[in-house]
Amino acid sequence: MAERPDLSKLSSAEKDALILALLERIEELERRLGLNSSNSGKPPASDGFKKPSRVTNQREKTGRQSGGQAGHAGTTLRQVATPNKVLDYYPALCVGCGGALDEELASGHEKRQVFDLPPPVMQVTEHRAHSCWCPACGSETRAGFPAEVKAAAQYGATVEALVVYFQAWQLIPEDRLAELMQDVFGVEVATATIAAMGQRKAQELAGLTAHIEEQVKHAAVKHLDETGYRIAGKLQWLHVASTCLLTCYRTSAKRGAMLSGVWGIIVHDFWRPYLAIVGVLHALCNAHHLRELKALMEIEKEPWARAMHRFLRQTCHAAHLARAQQRDLSPRFLAWLSARYDRILAQGFAFHEHQPPLGAGLPVRRGRIRRRTGHNLLLRLRDHKEATLRFLSDPAVPFTNNQAERDLRMMKVRQKISGGFRSEAGAQTFATLRTVLSTARKQGWNILSTLTTPPAILMQNLRAA
């Protein structure tokens, strides 16, 4: 806390400067109080129990009711032609005369099927490597065990895959996972064994993870984002680079440790280090712009922000409509949108030219002159116009960076459930497993099958974006 000045020793001019400084700080704090997850980059968890109204969210209204839409095929439980088990029931007495009946008098039947799971039972397979004497030379030769059978007693590939699936994909902590394996399958698995299974599987998938990373680097359009992660008692960072078919996670002690060897178009949220990546084109996340503009509309009451907010929403709708019709926006229409964009920016700059400068009346400070939040946003939209509107000229570029944010969301859920990682090796193991499993889900693969399939086969079947 700053030291409180002695007002009795201040001159009149110094008191006026102090009052102006305090008013400026109050204005800034009031602005921050008005921020929430709907009008800023703050996460929804920071809203507390007083959630902001979702009536004015950023999604476009479709006019359709909730639930399945007309033409949706849907899925339901249907009877099968060859059930695993059949139970027959015959009436014992006739309802008319009370005479005895049996199966030989049956004239037809009605069937109903119950789908259920059999009680899970651990199956133990014993491998015996026999020794044989040679009748010609008298030597004794013993057969070898399969390569995967390495111990006198061990868990099989399916148990290991199931443990990794529950821990890395369903995010069940080790202690609860040990209870689950005991309660459901009757298997006593120590937490240390669970951790060892994850480490072995991550080492096995390391080559596939490196291949996925290379594919993401060379994708035409990829999404980048990062989030803080507690690793070994320190704040470290989890980075994601992803497409609609691939996901690459990596941990780093530094937030600014950018992925090297990237080319093509990168979509991001205008964090400055992303702009330092050379040899790429940039596309900015307009969902962030819409939230910032919403804050300017609701808190700062800046009129140009509403016009820009409406413009971005309308251009997003026009781009989606063009893609749905498999056509490009005409050059004439793009030129008209560009001119309209420039007019809104001019309106915003004119608004800020008539605002009193921040710190007016205060002693002159060294360094860059402070600007208002809206003024900074205007400068970003002007200086990075091409990156902001790239989604209009390139159909492969989306309007937002939601792909990367969705890929990070479940990693934050894991942090809420289990906290941070005790070691960097554990964090890297988890990142490797989630890289493969998230990619498998996007590729349409079965997760359990992915964990039991050789990585070389998975690499051959991988579809690049």
Image (cartoon, rainbow, N blue to C red):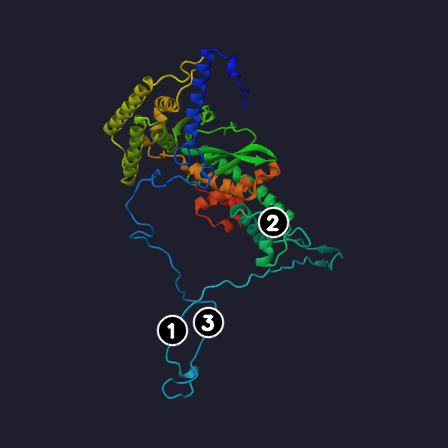
Q: Residues within 10 Å of mark 2 (few under 14, many from 20)?
A: few
Secondary element at tag 1: loop
Q: Which residue is mark 2?
A: 175
Between disc 1 and disc 3, the foreground one is 1
Which residue shows up at 40% across the image and 66% down it? 81
Q: CA distance from mark 1 to mark 2?
A: 48 Å
Where is residue 279 shown, x and y percent of the image? 43, 25
Q: In the figure, 176 relative to 273: above or below?
A: below
Where is residue 255 shown, x and y percent of the image? 52, 29
Q: Quadrant of residue 115?
A: bottom left
Say what amino acid the circle numbered 2 marks: Asp
Which residue shows up at 63% across the image and 48% down it? 191
Q: In the figure, 288 relative to 195: above or below?
A: above
Pick the front one: 276 or 380: 380
Say what amino acid the circle numbered 1 marks: Glu
Q: Which residue is mark 3?
A: 86
Q: Earlier in the sequence, mark 1 or mark 2?
A: 1
Q: In the visual, does 131 lie left or right of 94?
A: right
Q: CA distance from mark 3 to mark 2?
A: 40 Å
Q: Earlier in the sequence, mark 1 or mark 3?
A: 3
Between disc 1 and disc 2, the foreground one is 2
Q: Which residue is mark 1?
A: 110
Where is residue 185 shown, x and y percent of the image? 58, 58
Q: Residues within 10 Å of mark 1 (few under 14, many from 20)?
A: few
Secondary element at tag 2: helix
Pick the front one: 279 or 416: 416
Task: Check if mark 3's residue and mark 2's residue have beta carbons within 8 Å.
Answer: no
Quadrant location of the N terminus in the rendered image:
top right
Q: Is residue 279 visible?
A: no
Say what amino acid the circle numbered 3 marks: Val
